[in-house]
């Protein structure tokens, strides 16, 4: 019985941490995407290191993947639908960061902002 309680507690903690990290990834990706769009369309300077923020997302992706695998290893449940959704979501968030870097690179190459 104690093993089941400890397993349930650990399972809850790992997935809660993963969900909080996914929320943080959303926040960062929204920030860098907005900044790169403003740089491209309005010529505004990005006031932070966009590449460093993208690396933060990449580090969170690795950590969340580890947490999901850990959760799957200790979980007695064989339904993995939610975990697969999380993996897909974090991959997409990572892609937004990469696209944001590309937009900033394009903005830096253009002599003037793009006309919408």
Image (tube, helix red, strand yellow):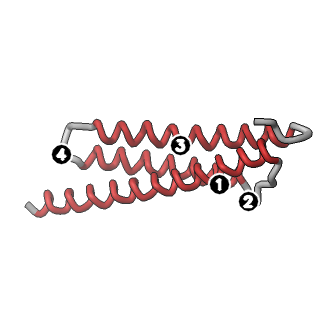
Toward which corner of the image does residue 109 lie, by quadrant?
top right
Q: Is residue 109 left or right of residue 51?
A: right
Which residue in the protein does label 4 denote? Answer: 76
User: Residue 87: x and y, percent?
Assistant: 42, 39
Which circle's residue, 3 or 4, is located before the other in the chain? 4
Which residue in the protein does label 3 denote? Answer: 93
Q: Nearer the viewer, mark 3 or mark 4?
A: 3
Which circle's residue, 1 or 2, is located before the other in the chain? 2
Farthest left residue in view: 1
Q: Nearer the viewer, mark 1 or mark 4?
A: 1
Judged from the image, the secondary structure of the residue bearing numbered disc 1 is helix
User: Residue 3: x and y, percent?
Assistant: 14, 59
Residue at the spot 22% in from the left edge and 47% down from the top edge:
75
Which residue in the protein does label 2 denote? Answer: 48
Which circle's residue, 3 or 2, is located before the other in the chain? 2
Q: Nearer the viewer, mark 1 or mark 2?
A: 2
Question: In the rendered view of the protein, which quadrant contains the N terminus?
Answer: bottom left
Judged from the image, the secondary structure of the residue bearing numbered disc 3 is helix
Judged from the image, the secondary structure of the residue bearing numbered disc 4 is loop
Which label is found at residue 32?
Answer: none
CA gap, disc 1 to disc 3? 12 Å
User: Residue 84: x and y, percent?
Assistant: 35, 37
Residue at the spot 71% in from the left edge and 44% down from the top edge:
37
Which circle's residue, 1 or 3, is located before the other in the chain? 1
Judged from the image, the secondary structure of the residue bearing numbered disc 2 is loop
Which label is found at residue 53?
Answer: 1
CA gap, disc 3 to disc 4? 29 Å
Pointer 1 with pointer 2, Cβ within 8 A? yes
Farthest front residue in view: 116
State the residue in front, 88 or 14.
88
State the residue in front, 12 or 96.
96
């Amino acid at each position: 019985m104690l093993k089941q309680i400890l397993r349930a507690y650990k399972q809850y903690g790992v997935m809660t941490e993963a969900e909080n990290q996914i929320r943080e990834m959303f926040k960062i990706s929204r920030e860098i995407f907005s900044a790169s769009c403003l740089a491209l369309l309005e010529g505004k300077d990005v006031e932070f290191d966009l590449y460093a923020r993208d690396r933060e997302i990449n580090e969170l992706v690795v950590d969340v993947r580890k947490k999901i695998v850990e959760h799957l290893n200790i979980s007695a449940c064989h339904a993995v639908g939610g975990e697969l959704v999380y993996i897909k979501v974090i991959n997409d968030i990572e892609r937004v960061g990469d696209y944001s870097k590309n937009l900033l690179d394009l903005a830096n190459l253009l002599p003037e902002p793009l006309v919408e």
